[in-house]
């Protein structure tokens, strides 16, 4: 699984650095290093008023915040790895 977090200026200002830390921590804690590649990407052109853009295996999600991270990770990472 490839997870790309937008680190363009708009997403950076909305907390992409926090999401990078959260994703890194969860991937390490759950020992998913062999299954998940975490990368940064520049602007995807999907800027949102709130939150950050995250692309998982080509599927784009907008407006991701650190407050919503846990449910996002469970639904869009863990559930897909389990299927």
Image: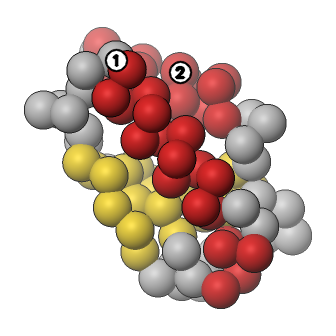
**Mark 1 / mark 2, whichever is N-terminal:** 1
Q: Residue at x 54, y 74 (%)?
A: 7
Left or right side of 54 for 35 = left
Q: Quadrant of the N terminus?
A: top left
Q: Is residue 14 above or below residue 67?
A: below
Q: Quadrant of the C terminus?
A: top left
Residue 17 quadrant: bottom right
Q: Position of residue 58 (x, y in %)?
A: 35, 58
Residue 57 in sight from this viewpoint = yes
Residue 36 quadrant: top left
Q: Is residue 40 above or below residue 20?
A: below
Q: Which residue was labeled with disc 1?
A: 30
Q: Residue at x 65, y 86 (%)?
A: 9
Q: Residue at x 51, y 53 (%)?
A: 20
Number of residue marks = 2
Q: Position of residue 49 (x, y in %)?
A: 87, 70
Q: Position of residue 39 (x, y in %)?
A: 33, 61
Q: Is residue 7 above or below residue 51?
A: below
Query: In front here: 15 or 73?
Result: 15
Q: Which residue was labeled with disc 2?
A: 74
Q: Residue furthest left?
A: 34
Left or right side of 79 for 47 = right
């Amino acid at each position: 699984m490839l997870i790309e977090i937008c680190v363009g200026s708009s997403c950076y200002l909305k907390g992409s650095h926090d999401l990078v830390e959260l994703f890194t921590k969860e991937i390490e804690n759950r020992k998913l290093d062999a299954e998940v590649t975490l990368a940064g990407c520049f602007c995807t052109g999907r800027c949102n008023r709130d939150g950050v853009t995250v692309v998982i295996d080509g599927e784009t999600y907008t407006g991701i915040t650190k407050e919503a991270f846990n449910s996002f990770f469970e639904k869009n990472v863990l559930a897909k790895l389990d299927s």
